[in-house]
Image (cartoon, rainbow, N blue to C red):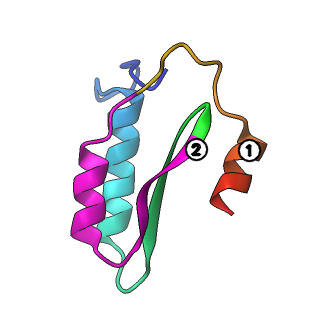
Amino acid sequence: SMDVKDMRTGQSRLDFGKDIIDEMIRGLNGETISLYTFTGEGNKAVPSTLDYVYGRILLKHLTSNDEGRGGTSLKGAIQKVM
C-alpha cells in the first residue's frame, strides 16, 4: 500500500513519490507533462499540459485509493500510458 510509512523520512510511500515527481516537474522547461494514477486500472489525473503549476497542484492533492485491490499490472499500466 502506498499509505505505508516506511521511508526513512517517516513519510508514506505516496508522499515520498509525490515529492520526487514535484522536484522533477520543477526542473522542466518547455516539456509537456501528464500524470497517471494506478489502482488496479490507470486513470489520467493530469492531461498533457505545459502548465506546471496546474500539474503540481493536482499532484499535491492526490490520495491513495487502495480499496484492497491486488495491485496494478505493469503491462497494463504501460499500455495505458502509451
Q: In this rendered view, identify the residue nearer to me: 22 or 65.
A: 65
State the residue at coordinates (74%, 44%). Answer: 76
Secondary structure at badge 1 equals: helix
* Mark 1 neighbour class, 10 Å CA radius: few under 14, some 14 to 19, many 20 or more: some
- Residue 39 is one of the magenta-drawn residues: no
Please name the residue shown 41% across and 20% down the image.
6
Which x, y percent locates residue 14?
39, 34
Residue 25 drawn above or below residue 78? below
Residue for badge 2: 42
Q: Work out which quarter of the rendered image holds the C terminus and state it.
A: bottom right
Identified by mark 1, the residue type is Gly
Q: Give the residue number, with chain letter if any, for mark 1.
A: 76
Q: Residues within 10 Å of mark 2 (few under 14, many from 20)?
A: some
Residue type at mark 2?
A: Gly
Tell me whether circle 2 and circle 1 mark residues in contact (CB < 8 Å): yes
57 above or below 82? Answer: above
- Residue at the spot x=70%, y=53% of the render? 78
Residue 17 placement, left or right of 79: left
Q: Position of residue 69 (x, y in %)?
A: 59, 18
Disc with the residue nearer the chain's start (2 vs 1): 2
Q: Is residue 54 magenta?
A: yes
Which residue lies at the image location 48% right of the left edge and 17% below the top edge?
Answer: 67
Q: Which residues are magenta?
A: 42-64
